Amino acid sequence: MKTYAEYLQMVETVLSAQLASLGQIPEKLFETMDYSLSAGGKRLRPVLLLAACDTLGGDLSEALPFACALEMIHTYSLIHDDLPAMDNDDLRRGRPTNHKVFGEGMAILAGDGLLSAAAELMLRAAVQMGDLRGVRAAEAILRRAGVTGMVAGQVMDVTGEGSTPTLEKVEYIHLHKTADLLTAPIEAGFLLAGATDEQVKAGCAYGMHLGLAFQMVDDLLDVEGESAVLGKSIGKDAAAGKLTWVAVRGAEQTRDDAKEQVRLAVEAMNMLPGETNFLKTLAQSTLNRVQ
């Protein structure tokens, strides 16, 4: 197993090049897409995919295009999330949001471009692999990013603004808007490594619990965090009437609930063979996030 920094460097080294490898992208479109794609960040999702594949002895060179594609999908979701019609944010990863620099039209097209580029990149890689592992990994990522996954969660998030928060509504949003895109890298990474159905099931449980904990902490940071550290605006959830875990459970109970989700994520890893300490430690570190 590698360190987080080593997995991160693998992604950073090739991310923009993977996008450029798809062909002659119009210069302005590439600039707009790459502005957000190369803005840094934790790269949590691609790191998770590489680590998941590595945990079960998979080939990281095969997994890398899928990891980059997943970061493209995550970046597209952030670009669209920040638009005036969605969360209306001015700051992302410590920089002006995409639409503030390039305009709303180009920001929408950059998001569209990153999503379609991700699908193309994964399917090209899957064809080269010559078996169904790549196809199954691409399907898992696109499903969890799609209309029954992340997009479904975003719909509830948008349409629920200003309504009375309930645990059922908030859990749906957290499971899909956040947890699905943190489960996707584990499911895809395991599939690329040739995991059994039971191993994939355990990996998906880990991703789900990790995702819930991650979003619970995110909700806390919007209340208690610092904008300069987070690299984005704070206090916007309450101002917009967002359905958050804190709104339903309060800050202290949210902290306790996040701890329980991390415990369940670690427990899921105990069902797997091999070295799982990286994924366990990563889940536990979620509780100490400041950004």
Image: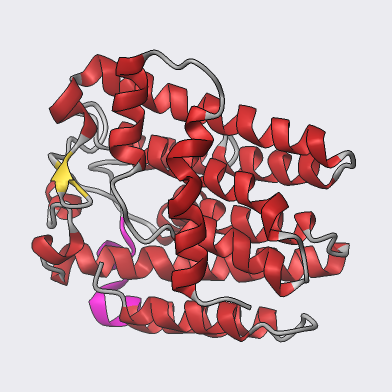
What is the quadrant of residue 208 in the picture?
A: bottom right
Give the left or right position of residue 186, taking residue 202 as reference: left
Q: Quadrant of the N terminus?
A: bottom right
> Eyeballing the image, is 275 above or below 213?
below
Name the residue located 20 percent from the left edge and 27 percent from the top edge: 99
The answer to whether residue 208 of the structure is visible from this angle is: yes
Judging depth in this view, the residue of 255 and 99 nearest the camera is 99
- Which span is picked out in magenta? 244-254
Name the residue located 85 percent from the left edge and 60 percent from the top edge: 194
Estimate the x, y position of residue 211 in percent, counting from the top left: 49, 63
Name the residue located 11 percent from the left edge and 67 percent from the top edge: 226
Judging depth in this view, the residue of 32 and 234 nearest the camera is 32
Name the residue located 28 percent from the left edge and 17 percent from the top edge: 106
What is the quadrant of residue 81 in the picture?
A: top left
Magenta span contains residue 155: no
What is the quadrant of residue 83 in the picture?
A: top left
Prevailing secondary structure class for the magenta stretch in the rendered image: helix
Estimate the x, y position of residue 61 in percent, counting from the top left: 68, 54
Estimate the x, y position of residue 270 in percent, counting from the top left: 71, 86
Estimate the x, y position of residue 142 in percent, counting from the top left: 63, 37
